[in-house]
Image (tube, rainbow, N blue to C red):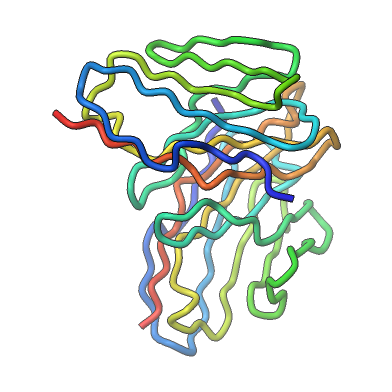
Amino acid sequence: GAVVSQHPSRVICKSGTSVKIECRSLDFQATTMFWYRQFPKKSLMLMATSNEGSKATYEQGVEKDKFLINHASLTLSTLTVTSAHPEDSSFYICSAQGGGGRSYEQYFGPGTRLTVT
Amino acid sequence: SQQGEEDPQALSIQEGENATMNCSYKTSINNLQWYRQNSGRGLVHLILIRSNEREKHSGRLRVTLDTSKKSSSLLITASRAADTASYFCATDARNYGQNFVFGPGTRLSVLP
């Protein structure tokens, strides 16, 4: 199957700093990428949907100025958590969709664990 | 509205037993997928079943889909301790590009 990578896998940062998380589709072109957030022992919650070359669509309750998403190419999307606070500590997972006849299938990255101290 | 709601939310079985998890959803779908997530790790894709399919197998996994009841089940046969994980179903709506909606998941514990 298709491969999606995320970097970094773990990051610890101090309150007030910004953190960038990368999501890459390694062997296909992702026309759409999704960013999810997962709290401990909870399911994934969609944060935003980004299409290559256009602005991301954020879900209700997600601050677009705090969670900056850039989808500059068909293989890379980035999520920047700006001015991070301890409540932003979470597991962030991206998924990528697109490419060929199975364009509706999504492939998930391994996730990034963010800890804000 | 919430789709892909799994039950039970927690399941504990002995090694060698079968584990069955169910998923219900509310709207028409293109396909339904099951994922596994080990604690603190990313999602692992298990099986995709399309709306015109009724059953699919992959190794020890068997997935059924009943679109009339808007439900799916995941059966893991001859469970192993390594199957301990959370299992999620995810559904997509009939609109192209619609994101997947995940249920809360079933936490499966397989005891040795």
**Residue A41: x %, y % from top left:** 40, 55
Q: Residue furthest left?
A: B112
**Residue A74: x %, y % from top left:** 72, 46
Q: Which residue occupies 57% across, 51% down?
A: A94
**Snapshot quadrant of residue A67:** bottom right
Looking at the image, residue B33 sits to the left or right of residue B51; the answer is left
Looking at the image, residue B43 sits to the left or right of residue A62; the answer is left
Q: Which residue occupies 76% across, 21% down?
A: A101
**Residue A17: x %, y % from top left:** 48, 85
Looking at the image, residue B92 sits to the left or right of residue B111; the answer is right
Q: Quadrant of the N terminus of chain A?
A: top right
Q: Which residue occupies 40% across, 11% down?
A: B59
Q: Which residue occupies 58% across, 81% down?
A: A82
Marks counted in the figure total 0
Q: Quadrant of the C terminus of chain A?
A: bottom left
Residue nearer the viewer, A61 or A63: A61
Looking at the image, residue A18 lies above or below residue A103 = below
**Snapshot quadrant of residue B37:** top left
Residue nearer the viewer, A93 or A1: A93
Residue nearer the viewer, B53 or A35: B53
Looking at the image, residue A57 lies above or below residue A80 = above
Looking at the image, residue B77 lies above or below residue A113 = above
**Residue B52: x %, y % from top left:** 75, 13
**Snapshot quadrant of residue A11:** bottom left
